[in-house]
Image (cartoon, rainbow, N blue to C red):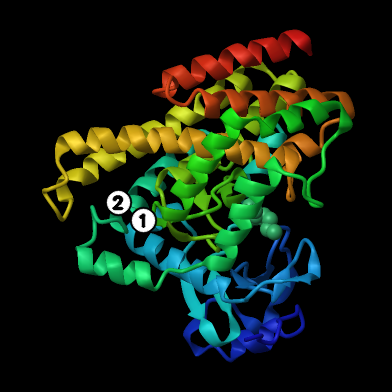
Amino acid sequence: MTVEVLTVETVPAYLASRADLAGLVDLASATVQEVGDGNLNLVFIVTDAAGGSLVVKQSLPYVRMVGESWPLSQDRILAEARGYDAATRLSPDTIPTYFGLHEERRVIVLEDLSAGTVWRRALNEGRISRGAAAVIGRHVARVGFGTSPFGLDSADYLRALAVSPNPELERITLDLVFTDPYRDHPDNAWNLAIEADVLGLREPLLLDEVAALKLRFQTGAEALVHGDLHTGSVFVPAEGDADAPPAKIFDLEFAFAGPVGFDLGAFFGNVLLAQARAAVLDRPAEFQEWLASLVAEAWDAFESEFRTLWPTRVDEAFTDGFLEQWLRRTWSDAIGFGGLKAIRRIVGLAKASDIESLDEAQHVAAARWVLGTARAIIEGREAVVDREALAALVGSRLAELRAGA
Ligand code: SR1
Ligand code: MG
């Protein structure tokens, strides 16, 4: 099914037809801007003369960054709506206010957070955003617990699983994260100076780990996860805005039933990109030290929130000892997925501005470092048992990068 695509001209009339949204913005004085800078969708900000505003998001029938030659079902907005429904119930303060889905038009309406900054941009500028990583950890814990067999009766969990398919976007992730970077593919591209590093990713030891993580992604349906929780899916406050919450998580269209560690991993992998950038740009020590604390901040908030929720689990057969085992498994998943998420942004389609906007010498040094570090993490997963071990590994490699810069 393909539905009519909205334009800046048609959005006011569309909103006027939505009695449920009446009063949120004054349509008589409203202006509309299309601001979608992600890879997939249309995003409109509607602002009125009194400063009221809303976001209207519609899925396009194709992949925006590629064009109509890559058709993609508009049903992905249904997955995003399921994600917002769950997060609104379980963790309302970590997402924008969600005003609901209009299924027939494949539209969702959200609070406008554009007064803030997309976190990737703030990181690229060298800005410190205190408390944002903890928001990610808390969000993952609350939604992960509440949509898993820990928080849901088994029948409710199975019913939720049955209505949570997102096969087209899972396929994109399978291809772009777990498959294409490790084979010849027309969408891959890299600077020739790192050719040996890229082709070195195809060695059997790493490919075995990639395979294990791929199967975990495909079959580890523990909970409804965000599915694309990189630093471009998070708003942080504008510089100097002390009143705004430390972070809000958005862009939930990749939401699927998967392993809880996948979302933490997406964040960890993107922290690695930010660390590489900061090192080659020789950013101030305070900024680099803060970057180095983000994985621990997110993990500690996740673990603490999960432990707080644990006594409310619906099934006491999940013992306290099992929680320790599950947390270890989730850490191991997270760092493995994190390594893969970093690699895909260097090798495959949809790269990250952290690395792409560097000048050539810096780009080469940062990209090579990301590949080598991500690989060391994935291959050494069994030894990287906690956040201290990860910090030691990344820290020693960063020292080498700085010494060579
Ligand atoms: C074709 S979509 C490319 C990427 O954009 C999204 O942000 C996801 O990360 C996806 O892999
Ligand atoms: Mg996105």
Three-letter amino acid code at disc 1?
Answer: Ala
Residue furthest toward the left? 316
- Whole-percent x and y of residue 12? 68, 84
Residue lying at 12% horizontally and 48% vertically, measured from the top left: 317
Q: Is residue 145 above or below residue 327?
A: below
Three-letter amino acid code at disc 2?
Answer: Phe
- Whole-percent x and y of residue 133? 48, 37
Q: Disc 2 on helix, strand or loop?
A: helix
Residue furthest toward the front? 204
Residue lying at 60% horizontally and 29% vertically, measured from the top left: 374
Q: In which quarter of the image is the N terminus?
A: bottom right
Residue furthest toward the top? 403
Which quarter of the picture shows residue 162?
Answer: bottom left
Residue lying at 69% horizontally and 80% vertically, measured from the top left: 29
Which quarter of the picture shows residue 342?
Answer: top right
Q: Do the residues labelled 1 and 2 touch (CB within 8 Å)?
A: yes
Q: In this view, does 160 lie above or below 212?
A: below
Q: Comparing marks 1 and 2, which lies closer to the viewer?
A: 1
Mark 1, residue position: 223
Mark 2, residue position: 145
